[in-house]
Image: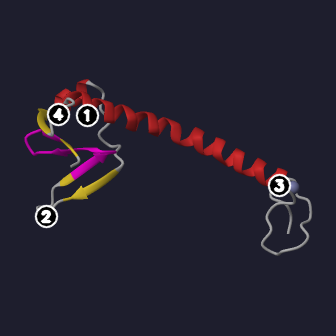
Amino acid sequence: MKCKICNKILLGRSDKKFCSVKCKNYYHVNLRKVTDRQVKELDTLLHRNRSILLEVLGKRKGQITVDRVVLEKKKFTFKYHTHLHINSKGKIYNYVYDLAWMEFSNDEILIIRKQ
Ligand SMILES: [Zn+2]
């Protein structure tokens, strides 16, 4: 086996991946940099989506129903969410962190704050 960073032949345990702490650290710092770069764009969109939901919902309300166009005008990105919840009636809640939205057939959107 060879070091994943410098290709030096590895001695000792067969599950070793790096020749030294230096190479191991280099690998993990680099991995983090690549990950940060790859996820940044989507993180930004998700954060913006959450801000838009919060702005429309307001700080005090638990839920609100608005026309879809209200979110569209604010450049809400409907396809990105953090997770989904399907309730007993089969309706889908699209979560953006702690806030969620659900679409009705009449182009209205329900925005709720997670209890
Ligand atoms: Zn190495």
Residue 38: x and y in percent read 56, 42
Residue flagged by tag 2: what amino acid is it? Answer: Ser
Graded by Cα atoms within 10 Å as few (under 14), some (14 to 19) or many (20 or more), the crowding at tag 4 reads some
According to the picture, the residue beneath numbered tag 3 turns out to be 21
Q: What residue appears at the point 59 percent right and 45 percent down from the top-left corner? A: 35
Badge 3 marks a residue whose secondary structure is helix
**Residue at left 19%, top 32%?**
57
Q: Based on the picture, tell me whether residue 67 belongs to the magenta stretch.
A: no
Residue, far left: 106
Badge number at residue 88? 2
Relative to residue 14, is residue 107 depicted above or below? above
Say which element carries label 1: helix
Which residue occupies the foreground of this view, 90 or 14? 14
| Circle 4 residue | 68
Residue that numbered label 1 is attached to: 53
Image-quarter location of ligand 1: bottom right
Mark 2–mark 1 distance (CA, rounded to whole Å): 24 Å
Residue 56, percent across and down? 20, 29
Give the CA distance from mark 2 to mark 3: 52 Å
Q: Secondary structure at mark 4?
A: helix
The chief SS type of the magenta part is strand
Q: Tell me the number on the disc at residue 107.
A: none
Q: Earlier in the sequence, mark 1 or mark 4?
A: 1
Q: Is residue 108 above or below residue 10?
A: above
Which is more toward the observer, 101 or 54?
A: 54
Secondary structure under tag 2 reads: loop
Label 4 CB-ligand 1 distance < 8 A: no
Query: How far apart are labels 3 and 4 at the CA level?
Result: 53 Å
